[in-house]
Amino acid sequence: MSTFGGLNTSHTALNAARTAVDVAGQNIANVKTPGYTRQRAELASSPVAGPIGVLALSRPGPGQGVMVTGIARLANEMLNEGVREASASSGYHATRAAALETLETGLREPGKDGLSARMQEFWASWQDLGNAAGDGAAAAVVLQQAATLAARIADGSRAVSSQWTALRKDASTMVDQVNHAAARVAELNDTIRRSTLAGGQVNELLDERDRVAADLASIAGGQVYDRGDGTVDVLVAGNPIVTGTTANRLVLAGPTTPGGTGAVSVQWERRPGTAIDLDGGELAGALSMLAPASGGTGGSLNEALASYDAVATALAEQVNAVHRTGATPNGTTGLDFFAFDPGVPAALGLRVVPTDVSGIAAALPGAGAKDGTIADRIAGIGRAAGSPDEVWGSFVGKVGIASGAESSRAQVAALGLVDAVGRQQSESAVDLDEENLALVTAQTAYQGAARVFTAIDEMLEVLITRTGVVGR
């Protein structure tokens, strides 16, 4: 190797070591940056110049130094996909668990403000009236408890309706977020492909694309497939929402009020009318809660509304059936105690018909105003099979079981996500000890190359200044 060749070799070593120092420093600077993937400078020997002429048969000469072949991004796509799958599962169960917990809390069961307590007080007021038939004060308590019970049923139904409406708005926001994320992935695909073809560094762009894809998976369960040209496809429910540099938009369709016709669904904007069967993510969890009632197996919120209506209907039918057989203080029979306002759900339209003691049929016909037989029979409705209390208790039990089970699933899914992220971070996250070691190694290499450079420079200086001088 010539003297000036040695200078070139040490110069390439200096450049390579400096690049390694820069990369290690960048890793350390981004140790707390979310989504950052650690990098490494890839080094290789510069190729040996091919001999020519008579030297072609001689042994190859030494290497020509060190070159940087690239900046490697230490990511593991299998682990990244595991994080996306875990995010989709966690998002789905967390959304359902939160909605069911809100529903369960709104029931106020057990407790003095719950519907069960209100019905017990209602039945107890009839029992008191049976013991003091004809007492205006006892009759007034019955009317008050009846009005309070009807109001509690209506309030509970309205609260569930409000929760349904709020969750549908959240679902609409989620669809907007998915569309924005898909558009951003398509945009990044284009930028990454162009930069790769131009020989530029795209590691930071790849980090951002992975973050956006993970967010999309958390919301809609997206799966990512590498196209091999610097771009990726993202699939939702088996269909591409991102293909290369093109993003396909989603829309939220279906009723905007609870109990409406049809189901709330996500559809492709370019193919309206066909619902997408999402298989994970927060959006799928929200849609499952918004689904129509189906005999106890439908969406929990619409099932709750149906249960409030069922309680109101059972209450009115069973009380009216007994009340019609009784007589008021003036002997009138065949009267209803409850009625429904037309055009609204039963839970919202339930109202008390009598306005005072003259409209309450507490006695058997012909038994006199002091008879309380019918009041006693109405008081016993709450203890009978198929009573409104039993209808309500069955629903409350189902909500409690569903909420507890979904909460457990959400906890398991969250732990799975933590585990997946931990395995991903063990591969791609910055480790300060490791980076400090890499930094020291690169700095030592830099110092060694600099020392070689200085030695050759000093040798050249001696040769240039002392040649021909020795012996004078």
Image (cartoon, rainbow, N blue to C red):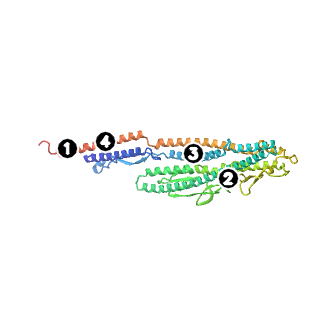
Q: Secondary structure at mark 1?
A: helix
* Camera-side mark, 4 or 3: 3
Q: Secondary structure at mark 4?
A: helix
Left or right of 295: which side holds 1?
left
Residue 447: image tag: 4
Q: CA distance from mark 4 to mark 2?
A: 72 Å
The mark nearer the N terminus, 2 or 3, is: 3
The mark nearer the N terminus, 1 or 3, is: 3
Q: CA distance from mark 1 to mark 3?
A: 71 Å
In the rendered structure, are the residues bearing label 1 and label 3 in contact, judged by CB atoms less than 8 Å apart?
no
**Crowdedness of circle 1 by 10 Å Cα count: few (<14), some, many (20+)?**
few
Q: Residue at x 77, y 50 (%)?
A: 316
Left or right of 70: which side holds 337?
right
**Crowdedness of circle 4 by 10 Å Cα count: few (<14), some, many (20+)?**
some
Q: What is the x, y in percent for residue 102? A: 62, 46
Left or right of 48: which side holds 348?
right
Residue 462: image tag: 1
Amino acid type at mark 1: Val
